[in-house]
Amino acid sequence: MSMHPITLKVNGKPHTLLVKSNELLVNVLRDKLFLTGTKYGCGIAECGACTIMKDKRSIMSCLVPAVVADGWEITTSEGLSKGDKLSPVQEAFVDLAAIQCGFCTPGMVVTATALLHENPNPDEDFIRDYLRGNFCRCTGYVAMSKAVLAAAAKMKEEAQ
Amino acid sequence: MNQMNESVIGKNIPRSDGHAKVTGTMVYPSDVIIPGMMYGAVLRSPHPHAEIVSVDTSEAERMGAVCLTYADINPIMYNERSVSIPAATYRDRTVLPSKARHFGEPLMAVAADTEELAHKAVKAIKIEYKVLEAVYDPDEAMKEGAPQLYENIYLGDNKLTVKNNIGVVRNIDEGDCAGGFARADRIFEHTFDLERIYHNQLETKCAVCKPEPDGSLTVWATAQSIHANRQLLARILNMPLSKLNVVRLPFGGAFGSSIQVNTVTPICACLALKAGRPVKLTSAREEDFYSHQKYPARFTVKMGVTNDGVITAAHVKALIDFGAHQVQPLPFMGCTAGWFASLYKYDGNIRFDGTAVYTNKTPCCAMQGYGNPQINFAIESMIDIICEEMRFSAVDFRLKNYRGIGDEFWGQGPTIRSIIKSCGVEQSLVEGRKMTDFENRQRPEDRTGDIRRGLGLARGFHTSGTAGPKEGEVIDYSSALIKINEDGSVDLVTPVTDHGGGTWDALKKITAETLQVPFDMVGLAPAATTNTGYDVCTHATRGVYCGGAAVYHVAMKVKERLLEYAGRLMAEHAYNLEVARRDELGQGVVQVKHFPSKFMTIGDIAKQAQIMSWGTIAYTDSYRQRNCPPCFTTHFVEVEIDTRTGVITVPKVLIFGDCGVALNPDLVKGQLIGSFNRGFGYTVFETMPLNEKTGELMNKGLLTDYKTPTSAEMPKIEDVEVILCDTYEPSGPYGAKGIGEAALASVQAAIANAVYNAVGIRFYKLPITPEVLLAALKKKEQEAAK
Amino acid sequence: MNTKILENEFEYSKPGSLEEVLETLATKQNVRIFAGGTDLIVKLKLGALPDMEHMLDINGVEELGKIETRADGLEIFAGAKLWSIESDRRVEENYPALREAIQAMASISVRNMATLGGNFCNASPVADAVGPVMCYGGKVRMQSKRGAREVNAVDFFLAPGVSVLEKGELLTSVYLPAPKAHTGHAFVKMGRVKSDIAKISITAVLEREGDRIASCRLAMGSVAARPLFLKAIGEGLAGKAMTEALAQETAQNISDFIKPIGDNRTTAEYRTDVAKVIARDALVSAWKNSGGTL
């Protein structure tokens, strides 16, 4: 079993870690860096609870050995806000009641953030399709779609 | 009450825990990390039915693992669910069994320094099994000679002998059914079948247990009731309650799966005590599937109807296959009977014959509705059948027969009943009929083409809480502690848990409104079993109605003390004073009635009370509601069916919800829409067949093969309309009732009735998957061709 | 099975050149390629690869992540992420059925990780992206220390999970020849939900000559032990005038021809029944977007 030194930049902060080749990124984030916003839900990329962002694209950390992530810069739900100031997506999720139990929320807001990076002017169909890999048992997704539309509008307003 | 500031009741306020939830900083049980903690892993049965002949844990122990087997545990028998009174509680299980009764049942457990080592140690345990024949079908299980799961179990303190795997029989007979049927012009009888489904709460069940230096144990666990966990753990561990502190946490969904103490929690506690170190035990998804599932049900429903549209009698026979352990099918059947009995009047002639049977499958427990979605599907399908066959208006027939204001409602089976005082049924049915032009919908035989739409209707309800004027089989009260701080802020301490529906914010609102302080000035204190009074559980849609009532009661007592102290300070009689919110001051005040310029801020009053050493303005108490008002829902669902593939989509849905006064309307609507999503899953998608050779789920506990409708399958924003009824529940805090479970009750039947309206085929069994629907369409076509 | 952690222990390496990758493949025992990980890690978690000793990460080889225009087509290298393929203009313009098939796969987060090479190497009979590659006349290129070779995509699969890929061999790229003018494309998939492994899928790529089908290639997923290329049925359409009746007749032939099994996703009967629906829809849709009218 090989041990590997890796460097990982998470939410702008560099970390150097020694990991075994079979350690998963989701578990390293949670158990070693105490970033527990990234959740375990199914372990096989069916639920999206472990979604993080790399190069402005969403990926599922339950299928990433940490050693593979050597040199990566990633963003987790904890890194979307600046201090106390929530990102437009986060703010819209709170304001439009797109949250219930909240366990899917970190993965959902990360995916929604990647969505708006890819397409700052999404229509509802685009949003519904984009979020299809993020499972939520509570909300029924309607309020989330509203929140992403609202965040898009707000970001456009702020950019002007 | 307050002219200057808008009331927080009924106002949409962004949820207080929103910030923590969107930033991922909210701590759920699975996020709890304790320095020096070990990781637990469970050895689960590879057989559906087997005796453990011998166990060898030596190799696992050599690896450094702490092992827990049947020999280590206190063999006390218990039921994981403890909301019923002890005399009405069946007991058939121990922390770990000496005999496996379903595939995936926890048999042994280990704790080790890493999760990886724990799992390796589990693999190193050697067990010899004597494999027994298993039985999965409830009809087979009741036959003479079928494999027997148990010889003896307990009801309360009485030892019972189990015969033919029959766990519970519950029969209820009221009025004169024979007479009612004799008066009917038509008799209808059909059998309805509902499969098991899985809660699929996103956070798998988890517990973290930490032995403390003083000999106590601190527990962070997935729990709908912290006190239920504490009391059961104390019994199992033989520890004083004061040594067991269960911490209240949010959890990643439960839907009823954590009303009972989760199976993993006592295991984790025993491991921690044996190891003398903190232990964390998180279920993997493939384990959680075998933890608990929703009760399946088979109902044979018989109804008598007169030509002028009166139901004269109804008889339901129920067969419940509840699996390998009882998580209380007794109250489940009582409640199911109650939901059936309370939907319509039936001229008072009601009979329910329920049998619940042990099988070698995962134990079943509550899942949003405790039998209500199941029986509602049967009854509301039956109503649709009657209306179709007798050409009654589906709306008028319901209006003629439903139980409404002044009628009796069974909130928790036959022993908990109260009188309905608020009711949005008429508003829902009449407005919905108009909005959907329901009476002019096309008949199924007039619909043609490959793509067919259909419109369906069903109504339902659930109780708010489990308390009636008279105490019954179920325990129901809540507690609260409220104190006013010396700056005018308020601490609210409640044992009530929040599923995410917004219960905590509702309790904060009740506190803020009663004491007239700004919402933000009410803080929700961390809480645990050692510093809160008892609350039975956030189940039965009782968080706001019962938990909120306790908060209201205590807040009123606090207000009393506040006004008394203010009276002394302001040289006024307390009865001449009132509280009022002054947001411009950032807090509430006590003012002279009709003379608001004479006031003191609440903070000043508390500060002065402190300076004068009068004491803290605080109060704690328990409170029991004396009603269980139904919260009503009605669903108008439009489906679209591709008759070539059997695929059902939902282009449009109209939902009516009657929760009394909605304390936070957006959150109520969110619950109704989320429930629609789950009901859509239950009706069309969710199924979990078993491999009958091995007793294992065909999906092996993986989400790959457990599909629920995603964002892509849900109707669009503008096609989902939710209307909250204009009702006021006089017994509820600020007019509120619950909504949580009611929100699901009528979804299934509404979809199935819409399917009937689209293609003219009645489905008596769920789910109506594309495979099922296409096969039925083919059959219909073949029959038509003959 | 354990979806929370990886219980296997293994070595890991991430070479910077193709030569080193091939060297590792040739010298180490029980090596598995990590490209996107979306199949590999799931298999490890499910306990399907108890013997894996070495995980070979090919993401260090820059050229393996590329999508290159060739004089006569497009070469998609093994490590290219599905997302980069579906968002590639050349793919959108020339191979829309491949784009649709990729977009129908799993979720965006998975597609940001997964690769086309992986979809081939996994050799699942269900693989969505395989049908379009077969229908576009695609080739699979492989390399080992012994040298390079190429096979037609239709000849790549042998059995569930088994391809012609030999020990020590790396799938380096999938090559797609340039499509001809008046080509029509369609990919139709049925799943339980949109983000799902297919219950059944079909690809149709045809070339039109006036009101006739000049040539047609059809492939199906999830109806046989490997991705099914419907050679004879496709070739039988050549030269025929396209009509609704022809589409339905062909669809019926396909439905009669396939011998699917039932599994966790659907039944054999359902697959047979809806095969004729999606086959008809795919043919009509491909015909229409080739510029044909019905």
Image (cartoon, coloured by chain):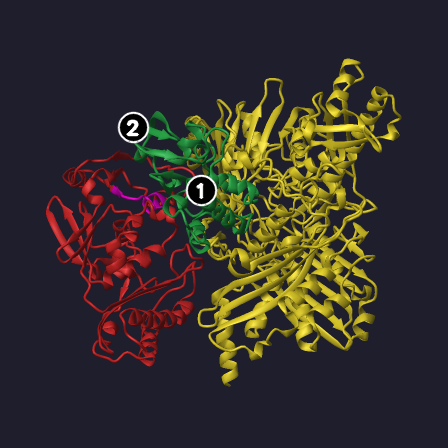
Chain colours: A green, B yellow, C red
Secondary-structure class at tag 2: strand
Quadrant position of residue C47: top left
Instruction: Give the magenta part as a residue range.
Output: C32-43
B581 left or right, relative to C251? right
The amino acid on which the numbered mark 2 sits, given as a three-letter code, is His
Residue at image location 73% in from the left, 70% down from the top:
B397
Q: Quadrant of residue C252?
A: bottom left
Q: Position of residue C250 (x, y in %)?
A: 31, 76
Mark 1 — residue?
Answer: A155
Q: Which of the chains bears the disc numbered 2?
A: A
Type of the residue with mark 1: Met
- Residues B563 and B457: in front is B563
Give the image quarter of residue C271: bottom left
Cβ atoms under marks 1 and 2 closer than 8 Å: no
Q: Nearer the viewer, mark 1 or mark 2?
A: 1
**Is B762 in front, or is B196?**
B762
Q: Is C155 colored magenta in this rendering?
A: no
- Asked whether residue C128 appears in the rendered view, the answer is no
Q: Secondary structure at mark 1?
A: helix
**Alpha carbon separation for disc pair 1 and 2:** 40 Å
Q: Which mark is residue A4?
A: 2
Where is residue C171 drawn, in percent x and y?
Answer: 20, 49
